[in-house]
Amino acid sequence: MGRKIDMKKIEDITKCQVTFSKRRSSLIKKAQEISVCCDVDVAFVAFSPSGRISKFCSQKRKSKRSLGNFTTLKNLELQIKKSTLELQILEADLRDYEPGPEQEPSLHQLSWCERNIEQSLQRVMARKVSSKT
């Protein structure tokens, strides 16, 4: 049996990249095996610690069907990059609401957060009302 490894984030960047490259090839191999054995569509997308995209799409089905609304893998990559950027923006916005433990929020920051939360709540309530009609 293999050795037991604790599941935790690898802090050392070099070790993280090495582990990713080793596991990536295993995951791609497993995705290919599932595709062949079960005759199913498989798409695998992974982002490396350095930001590179690794992808796999089963060859047998790729020509028969498109992946959802995307006609090519390039369009899928662009959508993933767009979503990643949106996520980074949202995470940055979220940090505005969570000052660090060494920082005390000012009254101005707290009132700004309160205003934004109230506006968001109003938008959600408006969507909820419009979706019921």
Image (tube, helix red, strand yellow):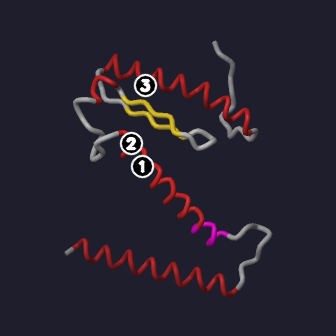
> Is residue 81 toward the left or the right of residue 19 in the image?
left
Element type where label 3 sits in the image: helix
How far is mark 3 from mark 2, CA to CA?
Answer: 20 Å
> Is residue 58 toward the left or the right of residue 103 in the image?
left
> Which mark, by number, is residue 47?
none
> Is label 3 or label 1 in front?
1
Q: Which residue is mark 3?
A: 31
Which amino acid, by three-letter code, is at mark 1? Leu
Q: Image quadrant of residue 72?
A: top left
Residue 95: say if magenta.
yes
Image vertical order of residue 94 relative to residue 3, above or below = below
Q: Position of residue 100 (x, y in %)?
A: 73, 67
Give the mark nearer the N terminus: 3 vs 1.
Answer: 3
Residue at 71% in and 38% down: 10
Q: Position of residue 109 (x, y in %)?
A: 65, 82
Q: Do the CB atoms of the residues marked 3 and 2 lie less than 8 Å apart?
A: no
Q: Do the CB atoms of the residues marked 1 and 2 lie less than 8 Å apart?
A: yes
Q: Which residue is mark 1?
A: 78
> Is residue 55 toward the left or the right of residue 41 in the image?
right
Q: Which residue is mark 2?
A: 74
How far is mark 1 from mark 2, CA to CA?
Answer: 6 Å
Q: Which residues are magenta?
A: 93-98
